[in-house]
Amino acid sequence: MRKHVRDRLSLGAAVAAAAVLVGAALVVTTNDNKVDERGSDLTLPSPTSSASPSPAPKLLGSPVPLEPGPPTKPKAGTYRYRLTPPDVENPDRTTEVRIVDNGSTGQTEILDGQLAKNVVWRDDGKYILQHTFGQPQGAACDWEPDIRELAFPLREGRWVTKTSCRPFEGGVIEHSAVSQIMGAAQVIIGGQDVVVWVIRSESTELYKNSQDVVEQKQVSRSHFSPKLGLTVRLFQRRTGEDLQSRKEFDQAVTLELVSLNPS
């Protein structure tokens, strides 16, 4: 039993961290062409003295409609994301996502050298095949069916995901999500204008074994650039029970791409 609990905790932390790479958004265009970023279910972190607030997105309704264009795979390399609020012990720390090509349609996205996410770009969407924690060796969460992270063609609408994996004997992680593309927007990232799709998502993860069930929820909104193949900005809030301490938590964070060019 102790081994099962330890494995469940490790994989739970991995799947929770995976949320950094997947986001969603709530941005509503009103009739007077002003942006209404309402979200009673999503409380964003307050601005801090060490991080300037991001410029508000320019949304549809302008004389020239925004055209995000068709999706493409991101270039291989390492991308850095700035966190708000920043790390208390290391305010200048950034989150790194390293992307490695696996053939013509597959890629591996590695978060801070720890969590690996294997994905594939198909005609009808971008899919997450597996999460692996503790690269190069670690427990694997092979999703059945695959998680549909993005639905192609990209356009206003919604899609539903329900899947699970069995990372250890007697245990299961269940993932369910509802994602919706709200519209197009223009944002400033790294000093450059980027046209994005605005995506909102709500998800639930259940971590189960023969003894108990732990539930965690996430609500988020993201700005996805089809031209770059990347989420350039992510607003995320997670709530639920911590898998290790078993205490309730409520955490919010914003991540923004530092540069459009990988290193």
Image: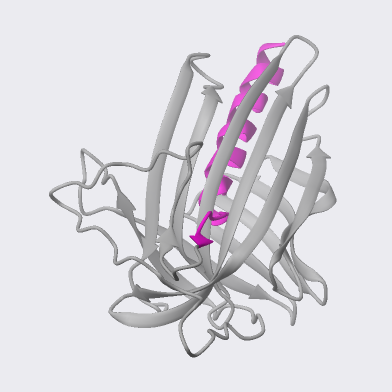
Residue 188 is left or right of residue 50, and the answer is right
**Does 239 sit above or below residue 158?**
above
Q: Residue furthest right?
A: 145
Residue 17 inside the magenta-drawn segment: yes
Residue 137 seen by the camera: no
Q: Position of residue 119 (x, y in %)?
A: 71, 63
Residue 146 inside the magenta-drawn segment: no
Q: Position of residue 241 (x, y in %)?
A: 55, 20
**Does 184 sit above or below residue 170?**
below
Q: Quadrant of the N terminus?
A: top right
Q: Position of residue 159 (x, y in %)?
A: 77, 56
Residue 34 is left or right of residue 91, and the answer is right
Name the residue nearer the viewer: 204 or 53: 53
Residue 189 seen by the camera: yes
Q: Residue furthest left?
A: 49
Locate residue 186: give its quadrant: bottom left
- Which residue does the image show at 65% across and 80% down from the upper left? 71
Q: Which residues are magenta?
A: 1-29
- Chief secondary structure of the magenta span? helix
Q: How is the image coloured?
A: one colour
Q: Quadrant of the C terminus?
A: bottom left
Residue 138 is left or right of residue 127, and the answer is left
- Which residue does the image show at 74% across and 79% down from the upper left? 103
Name the residue nearer the viewer: 178 or 117: 178
Q: Residue furthest front?
A: 32
Q: Position of residue 7 (x, y in %)?
A: 66, 26
